Image (spheres, grey):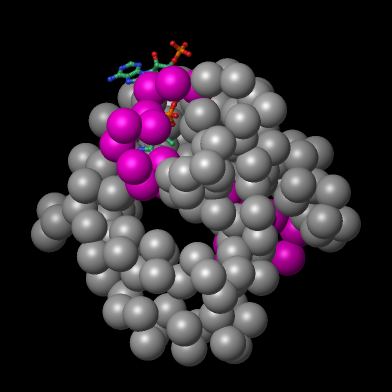
Amino acid sequence: MKAHEIRLAKLGEGDLDNLSRWAQSDEAYGTYDEPSRLTLPQIRAKWEKGEYAYTWIIHHGEKKVGFCHSLPHPWNDWTAILAVIIAEPTARGRGIGTEVHKRLCHTIFALQAEVQKIEAYTDRENQAEQRVLEKCGFVQEGLLRKSGLIRGEIRDMYVYGLIR
Ligand SMILES: CC(C)(COP(=O)(O)OP(=O)(O)OC[C@H]1O[C@@H](n2cnc3c(N)ncnc32)[C@H](O)[C@@H]1OP(=O)(O)O)[C@@H](O)C(=O)NCCC(=O)NCCS
C-alpha cells in the first residue's frame, strides 16, 4: 500500500449505491460489526437530510474500498465518534485502515473546531481495529461490558480515546 494511493472523498450522490450494497452485506462489515441493513431509498433520504455531512468514501487507486465517518456524541458536543469500515475484504490487512484512521482524525480536528476528543468503540475481540487505534495514538480507556449487539449477540466493547 502506498499512502498516495489512498484518498478520502466526501460522500456524494454517486456513492449511495455503494453504501447501500455494503449496508446489506455481512462480509463488508467483517466479523465484529453489524451492517445497518438500510435500503437505498433510506440511505438517500438520510443523505438528502444532510445526515452524511461527515462521511467519506475511501478510495484506493481507482477502487472504492469502504467508508468512514465522524458521528456526534450522544451527550456532549466536544467529542466525536470515529468509525472506519474497509468494506472490501481484499483491501484489509494492507495498511489502508491505519492510514485512513490517521487521516480521519486529522480531518475531524481540522474541520470540527469544537471537537476536543475522538472516541472509538470496538468489539473486545476485534484485534485488528485495536491494533490500528493504538498505532494511531488512541488510548484504551475501558471495557464496556455487554454493550454492542452483533448478529443477535450482546458483546463486550472497548472504548478508546484520542485527545486533540
Ligand atoms: C478493522 C479495520 C478497519 C482495520 O483496517 P486494515 O486496513 O485491515 O488494517 P491495517 O492493515 O492498517 O492494520 C491492521 C493491524 O492489525 C493487525 N492485525 C490484523 N488482524 C489481527 C489479529 N487477528 N490479531 C492481532 N493483530 C491483527 C495487523 O498485523 C496490523 O498491525 P501491524 O501493522 O502492526 O502489523 C478493517 O480490517 C475493517 O474495516 N474490518 C471490518 C470492519 C471493522 O471491523 N471495522 C472496525 C469497526 S470498530
- Left of 120 or right of it: where is 65? left
* Residue that extends furthest to the left in the rendered view of this protein: 152
Task: Name which residue lies at 37% across and 87% down.
Answer: 41
| Residue 101 seen in render | no
Task: Name which residue lies at 53% across and 20% down.
Answer: 1
| Residue 97 screen position, x and y as percent | 50, 32
Quarter of the rendered image showing ligand 1:
top left
| Residue 150 screen position, x and y as percent | 21, 53
- Left of 11 or right of it: where is 93? left
Q: Is residue 58 above or below residue 10?
A: above
Q: Is residue 12 above or below residue 10?
A: below
Q: Is residue 137 above or below residue 25?
A: above
Asked if the stretch drawn in magenta spans residue 94, the answer is: yes
Instruction: Name the foreground residue: 46 vs 20.
Output: 20
Asked if the stretch drawn in magenta spans residue 103, the answer is: no
**Quarter assignment of residue 75:** bottom right
Where the C terminus falls, by quadrant?
A: top right
Q: Which residues are magenta?
A: 71-95
| Residue 15 screen position, x and y as percent | 50, 66
